[in-house]
């Protein structure tokens, strides 16, 4: 399982999650801001990680009630916000309730769950009528077909590893359709493909750092499992870590949707 390979207890995991937040929070925040949430919104952040989205919601909407949830909430940054609470939730087993939330958010969570499509129904049920769901999921389809033969071969090998774990890192491409079939409306989806470049304090640099840490952590499984040679991984990391390289990274689908009013 994902939490076994990349547990919050790893010495590099807090940094990896922080880098991921720096890379993707701007798109998440902009998507949520377009929703015009009520000032007293009840919000659930699933897979909160370091809690950047939950903390931003609590600060932006001081009259809101925000729950930061994860399998392990120990990585959520310490804060003194009175309107944020921590709760351990396992989407594979725990009920989310009915008509509780004005907003449910999750990022890079569903693709790791074998019951990802069933979970969408539980999230829909947990929203109040008119409530919003903001979800970002990985969409590797484009990176696995370019921009170079080596790059495509590397990411295809990585996808073979993730498939062996039961993960679907192409789920983002089909997410809007699954949302519609589940009963969500007002679906708005944007494909984001970050350009990896390690220089500066940019989202692209943070994305490069995220993948550098992710691949280095998974190296024993990638190489030991026979999914790629050590030389392939070394070359891929040299590209990702090159401050003079500008290389397209894996894509993401940033999506918002609503539960119908009736």
Image (cartoon, grey):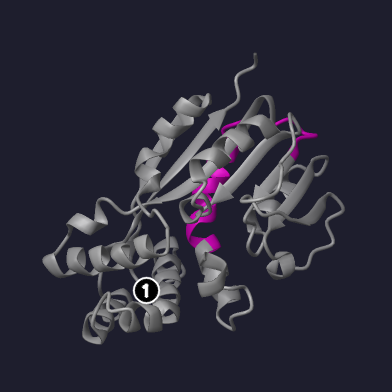
Circle 1 crowding by C-alpha within 10 Å: few under 14, some 14–19, many from 20:
many
Direction right: furthest residue: 82
Find residue 183 and report its horizontal and vertical position in percent: 53, 24
Q: In this view, does 28 lie above or below 126?
A: below
In the rendered structure, does residue 29 fall within the stretch colored magenta? Answer: yes
In the picture, which quadrant includes the C terminus? top right
Find residue 21 and report its horizontal and vertical position in percent: 55, 61
Lateral position of residue 61 relative to residue 122, left or right: right
Image quarter of residue 50: bottom right
Lateral position of residue 52 relative to residue 58, left or right: left
In the rendered structure, does residue 141 fall within the stretch colored magenta? Answer: no
Q: Which element type, helix, strand or loop, lies under badge 1? A: loop
Q: Which of 243 and 151 is in front in this view?
A: 151
Magenta stretch bounds: 21-42
Q: Which of 179 and 23 is in front in this view?
A: 179
Q: Name the residue under label 1.
A: 198
Q: Is residue 109 above or below residue 186?
A: below
Q: Which of 146 and 32 is in front in this view?
A: 146
């Amino acid at each position: 399982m994902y939490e076994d390979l990349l547990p919050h207890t790893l010495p590099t995991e807090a940094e990896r999650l922080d880098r991921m937040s720096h890379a993707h929070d701007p798109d998440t925040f902009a998507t949520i801001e377009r929703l015009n949430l009520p000032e007293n919104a009840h919000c659930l952040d699933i897979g909160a990680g370091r809690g950047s989205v939950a903390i931003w919601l609590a600060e932006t909407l001081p009259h809101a009630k925000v729950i930061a949830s994860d399998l392990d909430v120990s990585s959520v940054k310490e804060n003194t916000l009175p309107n944020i609470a921590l709760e351990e939730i396992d989407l594979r087993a725990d009920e989310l309730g009915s008509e509780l939330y004005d907003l449910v958010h999750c990022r890079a969570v569903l693709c790791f769950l074998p019951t990802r499509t069933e979970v969408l129904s539980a999230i829909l049920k947990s929203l109040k009528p008119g409530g919003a769901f903001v979800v970002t999921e990985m969409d590797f389809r484009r990176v696995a077909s370019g921009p170079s033969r080596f790059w495509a071969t590397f990411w295809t090998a990585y996808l073979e590893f993730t498939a062996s774990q039961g993960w679907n890192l192409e789920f983002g491409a089909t997410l809007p359709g699954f949302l519609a079939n589940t009963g969500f409306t007002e679906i708005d989806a944007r494909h984001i493909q970050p350009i990896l470049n390690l220089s500066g304090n940019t989202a692209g640099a943070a994305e490069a750092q995220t993948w550098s840490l992710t691949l280095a952590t998974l190296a024993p499984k990638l190489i030991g499992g026979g999914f790629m040679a050590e030389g392939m991984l070394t070359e891929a990391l040299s590209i990702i870590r090159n401050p003079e390289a500008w290389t397209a990274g894996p894509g993401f689908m940033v999506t918002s949707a609503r539960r119908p009013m009736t």
